[in-house]
Image (cartoon, helix red, strand yellow):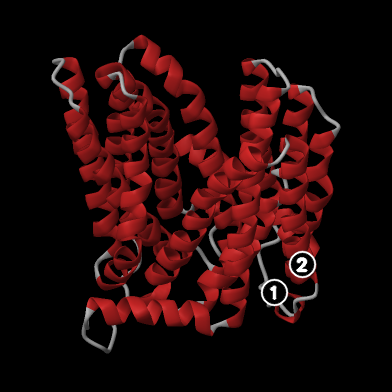
């Protein structure tokens, strides 16, 4: 009988520490453009600093996965948390003494991006060693809920913290990452089995990760699904926000719209372990595409911000289930020595798609009326839905046995007690 997640000390430490640090990270992401604008008076500089985080993460992404597969993953996570806390702490001091510069903030943003690029594959690759295979889908769903909760709470709090003082959100970020560092000090993952092959050329190791992703049909097809969905939905999201502004929807209602996407993600992640069991892999993956295809054109007839928020809530309910199904299969199917590279490759391609989506959405709003832009996004998702539905790979997607008890509820209770 496996230990439930509620009593799995290693998993509770990791989950709680990262729940705290993600709050701080998202508070910083909201405060960064505000503080750059306050210091420099330049909106362009604000965008450049914020874009540096994503750019650094994308540039370092592929090498990071290969390095994570070489190095001690717990040590990588500890180093990332410590470096992040120190970098943000330097900005806190600079703001406190009134000597902050845009150049300093660019460096801090780059450090944050590099740390994220290393930490994420290290955590993903470590997760299967912390929980039994039967509980992995529940752990993946809990991590999804953690990310949505951190984004929602950190984003909401960031503005208030900034209003209290320019340095305050960054101080909160430094303290939360320091707390996550302390939690990781007590993490005791089982030792990894040494690879029979010595570390080779980094470029060849990166190519090996790319070949692994492309050479396995289930991973390749589900990665393409994620890319298409991220591209069209992120384009659709920007189109809806701009369309709401053009219709005169008040800013507070637009804020609620965005928040409801996060709330739906949290609720969907809490329901994901149950839905993952009862829906099966094929339905849980294709269901997301069909629901989005049905719901995206509803924006043409819904003009009230709160009703659009309800629509966003509904759209966000099923993606965590599909993510749980896909990530669980990918982690269980991939050898431990390749899991870091798997995570980095997938993170890179989905990140590029998510970054390109708003560009596509902005172009659509420039060249077409808002209603037409909505329909074009819907058409893209609908085409992807048809391809996903007839895919023989997804029809025969492997199914893994998972724990039938309510591990998610118990684990959340246990993590809360630990925190």
Q: In which quarter of the image is residue 251?
A: top right
Q: Count up the numbered dots.
A: 2
Q: Quadrant of residue 191?
A: bottom left
Which residue is most to the bottom?
A: 196
Name the side, left or right, on which 404 lies relative to 137.
right
Vertical position of residue 95 compared to residue 359: above or below: above
Which residue does the image show at 62% across and 58% down from the upper left?
323
Q: Residue 308 has which mark?
A: none
- CA–CA distance in space, label 1 to label 2: 7 Å
Is residue 192 visible to the viewer in this orientation of the structure?
yes
Quadrant where the C terminus sits is top left
SS of the residue at dot 2?
helix
Which residue does the numbered mark 1 point to in the structure image? 399
**Residue 224 placement (x, y as % from top left):** 60, 68
Which residue does the numbered mark 2 point to in the structure image? 280
Which residue does the image show at 62% across and 69% down from the upper left?
222
Q: Earlier in the sequence, mark 1 or mark 2?
A: 2
Q: Residues within 10 Å of mark 2 (few under 14, many from 20)?
A: some
**Residue 313 placement (x, y as % from top left):** 72, 36
**Residue 410 placement (x, y as % from top left):** 61, 45
Quadrant where the N terminus sits is bottom right
Which residue is most to the top?
A: 164
CB under 8 Å between callouts 1 and 2? yes
Name the side, left or right, on which 304 lies relative to 164.
right
Q: Residues within 10 Å of mark 1 (few under 14, many from 20)?
A: some
Of residues 248 and 403, the one nearer the viewer is 248
Q: Quadrant of residue 284?
A: bottom right
Which residue is most to the front?
A: 367
Which residue does the image show at 73% across and 68% down from the upper left?
281
Name the side, left or right, on which 94 lies relative to 106.
left
**Residue 406 placement (x, y as % from top left):** 68, 51
């Amino acid at each position: 009988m496996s230990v439930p997640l509620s009593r799995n000390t290693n998993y509770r430490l990791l989950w709680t520490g990262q729940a705290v640090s993600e709050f701080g990270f998202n508070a910083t992401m909201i405060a960064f453009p505000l503080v750059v604008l306050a210091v420099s008076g330049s909106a362009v500089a604000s965008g450049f600093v914020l874009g540096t985080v994503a750019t650094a993460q994308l540039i370092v992404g592929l090498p990071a996965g290969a390095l994570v597969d070489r190095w001690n993953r717990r040590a990588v996570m500890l180093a990332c948390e410590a470096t992040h806390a120190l970098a943000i702490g330097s900005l806190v001091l600079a703001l406190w003494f009134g000597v902050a510069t845009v150049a300093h903030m660019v460096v801090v943003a780059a450090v944050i991006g590099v740390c994220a690029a290393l930490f994420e594959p290290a955590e993903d690759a470590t997760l299967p060693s912390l929980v039994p295979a039967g509980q992995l889908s529940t752990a993946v769903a809990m991590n999804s809920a953690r990310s949505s909760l951190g984004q929602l709470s950190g984003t909401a709090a960031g503005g208030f913290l900034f209003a209290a003082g320019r340095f305050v959100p960054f101080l909160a970020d430094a303290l939360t990452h320091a707390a996550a560092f302390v939690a990781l000090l007590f993490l005791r993952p089982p030792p990894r089995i040494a690879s029979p092959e010595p570390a080779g050329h980094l470029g060849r190791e990166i190519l090996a990760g790319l070949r692994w992703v492309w050479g396995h049909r289930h991973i390749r097809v589900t990665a393409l699904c994620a890319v298409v969905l991220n591209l069209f939905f992120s384009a659709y999201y920007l189109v809806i926000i701009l369309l709401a502004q053009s219709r005169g929807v008040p800013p507070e209602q637009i804020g609620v719209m965005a928040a409801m996407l996060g709330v739906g993600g949290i609720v969907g992640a809490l329901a994901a372990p149950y839905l993952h069991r009862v829906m099966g892999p094929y339905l849980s993956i294709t269901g997301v595409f069909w629901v989005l295809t049905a719901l995206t054109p509803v924006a043409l007839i819904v003009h009230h911000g709160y009703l659009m928020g309800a629509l966003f809530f509904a759209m966000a309910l099923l993606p965590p289930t599909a993510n749980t199904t896909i990530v669980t299969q990918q982690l269980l199917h991939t050898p431990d020595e390749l899991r870091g590279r798997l995570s980095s490759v997938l993170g890179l391609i989905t990140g590029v798609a998510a970054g390109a989506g708003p560009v596509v959405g902005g172009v659509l709003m420039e060249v077409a009326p808002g209603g037409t832009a909505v329909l074009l996004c819907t058409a893209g998702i609908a085409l992807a839905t048809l391809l996903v539905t007839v895919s023989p790979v997804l029809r025969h997607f492997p199914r893994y046995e998972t724990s039938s008890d309510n591990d998610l509820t118990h684990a959340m209770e246990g993590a809360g007690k630990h925190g």
